[in-house]
Amino acid sequence: MSGDHSHSEDQVDGGPRFSDSQKHKDKFKKEHKHKDHKKEKEREKSKHGNSDHKDFSDKKHKDKEKMKHKDGSTDKYKDKYKEKRKEEKIKSFDCKVKLEKENGFDSPLHLKSEPENIFHSPKNDKSLKRERDDDDYEIKPKKIKTENDKKAKKRKPQVEDIKTVKTKNKKGEMPDGKKKAKKEPEEKWKWWEEERYTDGVKWKFLEHKGPVFAPPYEPLPSNVRFYYDGKPMVLSADAEEVATFFAKMLDHEYTTKDVFRKNFFKDWRKEMTPEEKAKITDLKKCDFSEMHQYFKAQTEARKAMTKEEKLKIKEENERILQQFGFCIMDNHKERIANFRIEPPGLFRGRGDHPKMGMLKRRIRPEDIIINCSKDSKYPEPPPGTRWKEVRHDNKVTWLVSWTENIQGSIKYIMLNPSSRIKGEKDWQKYETARRLKKCVDRIRNQYREDWKSKEMRIRQRAVALYFIDKLALRAGNEKEEGETADTVGCCSLRVEHIKLYPEIDGQEYVVEFDFLGKDSIRYYNKVPVEKRVFKNLQLFMENKEPDDDLFDRLNTSILNKHLQELMDGLTAKVFRTYNASITLQAQLKELTSEEENIPAKILSYNRANRAVAILCNHQRAPPKTFEKSMQNLQTKIDAKKEQLSAAKRELKGAKADAKVRKDEKSKKAVESKKKAVQRIEDQLMKLEVQATDREENKQIALGTSKLNYLDPRISVAWCKKWGIPIEKIYNKTQREKFAWAIDMAEKDYEF
């Protein structure tokens, strides 16, 4: 008997143990089930009988069997205690390996006991504790058998738990898996409470699965044709694929732009066979309409998919996410931001980009550089291919890189904004901006003195620094002629980009800026400046042509070197971050009133954020659906006003009725009507605030400054001070990104 028992333990890891008594129990269950079925039949024939007594005796007998089985297994366990303790060590290691295999990381080289890792987080401790608990659970397996069936049923509806332990359920390890699945989402790695790496080291262990490539091109059905000069023409696979990129965009204004069409046709011809090149010579004679209709129908079919079809796609995406969307970095599972390689297509660019319409080529494994640990399991390239290179550089944060063909820029696969590496970078950025606060007055006094310098280069540098500080302008980058769009920053401003007005609109010494900034967003601003700045600008513009540089003795390298001398780590972006954060803090103090309710306070927050977005020139075109959404909102407001009028009439009637009746029931009716009026008034005010907010924001992008230039601790402190739920300011993704700020900022935090 004991031999059988130990044999079953070896076969099943942490699962139920089978014995003779267990077989007897299973047999008894079958008999009992048969008896229950028989009883049901008897009840139908007659409403009375001695079945209650029979049930009781059966239950008593079953309980005896359970106790007998439990006692027997405990005795055996005591006899073999020493032998089992040896086996448990092996099993706990096997369990770890199984867990790692399920997560897609079957390398045992990054166990949590790795001595070289300097990180020591509460998460590590918890996970180790869980492993010990699991071992204890494994020692007493009979508890699983005697557990109430209802408890087991309660666990089932938790979809997340089932997903995480899919393979474990088959092996009978559900309790272990469920225990971990329940705890893991609650655990937050508070990396900000740990020591940071020094000497530029970003990580000590890194393992991932590499990128997900775009699916291969699927040729069009034979009934979907391309026409040239009114006649159908069969294209080669490469030429057809590029043609589909243009066909998909026929509804877009891009395909009407000359630059876009010219660049597309030039790159398309490179993909054609010699015969196709000889025949297709004019884009105007090309007819992509059948292709366009085909893709339009596909889009409609996707929208009309059944729930089951959508669920299948969702499950497949989830599977890919679990496999490729996470990496192991220093014993922690971290989310990857963009693990999919962008598919081939036509480059759009922002604004009037000179390269719009050019072909973005398909990225292949041979273009990819992988970065991971030497001691990790390297990502495997698709069958029959190889990586360009595998590196082990722990002083960079990227996992995958490649060079795109349009502008020759390097693209990266990085970690999610909620990761330690991204969070540390953000935290450091805002701390640097806070350091600037301590010395900004000294820097401002210095550049004011430099406006009077005898050296022209120092004067130009001082005026440029004034613009960066006062107007939050970007420094600007040096570019090769014709390589990118004609966008400029402070250092690359030309004479044509500014106009000087000694007096205009009742203001003196006004400078009018008009140029394309980052992403070809127009920067237009009329701003009064100090008299000495105005005089210097007149001096800089003397004897220059419109396309000459305004600051001809300055570039970004000279400016950045000077900024480093003023303060360690100081850049134009630090000035921008400092001015954005300090503006938000000042605006929040000025606009927030204690008497306001939550919707009004949130409107005040958005107005403060808007002031920052205007300072940083974060503009956007009004959304296409703006007018329609505003009409819908106005309809809701009108309906709510009618509802309020009706509620007030009902309240008036209830008051009149209460005066006549003077009983308790009529008094309660009045109170009820009062509450209804108050509730509708609150709802109306929320809608009106929403309409105001939406109207004011239609051309301002609040998200850019909120995520990149505003110290999140200012927003968190404001929420805590005024009792505003953080969910009203930051969505779930943003809360994950700023978890460090939410945890550390108190209501009295000052930037």
Image (tube, rainbow, N blue to C red):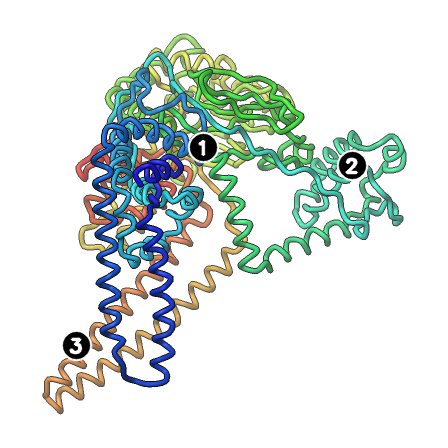
Circles 1, 3 touching at the beta carbon (< 8 Å):
no
Q: Kindly identify the amino acid type of the residue bearing the numbered disc 3.
A: Glu
Q: Which circle, 1 or 3, is nearer the viewer?
A: 1
Q: Position of residue 630 (x, y in %)?
A: 46, 60
- Which residue is at 36% across, 76% downward? 40
Q: Is residue 519 above or below residue 44?
A: above
Q: Is residue 631 above or below residue 389?
A: below
Q: Residue 739 falls in which quadrant of the image?
A: top left
Q: Earlier in the sequence, mark 1 or mark 3?
A: 1
Q: Is residue 26 above or below residue 196?
A: below
Q: Residue 26 falls in which quadrant of the image?
A: bottom left
Q: CA distance from mark 2 to mark 3?
A: 75 Å
Q: Earlier in the sequence, mark 2 or mark 3?
A: 2
Q: Which circle, 2 or 3, is nearer the viewer?
A: 2
Q: Earlier in the sequence, mark 2 or mark 1?
A: 1
Residue 239 marker: 2
Q: Kindly identify the amino acid type of the residue bearing the numbered disc 1.
A: Lys
Residue sticking out furthest to the top: 454
Which residue matches tag 3? 671
Q: CA distance from mark 2 to mark 1?
A: 43 Å
Q: Position of residue 298 (x, y in %)?
A: 67, 53
Which residue matches tag 1? 101
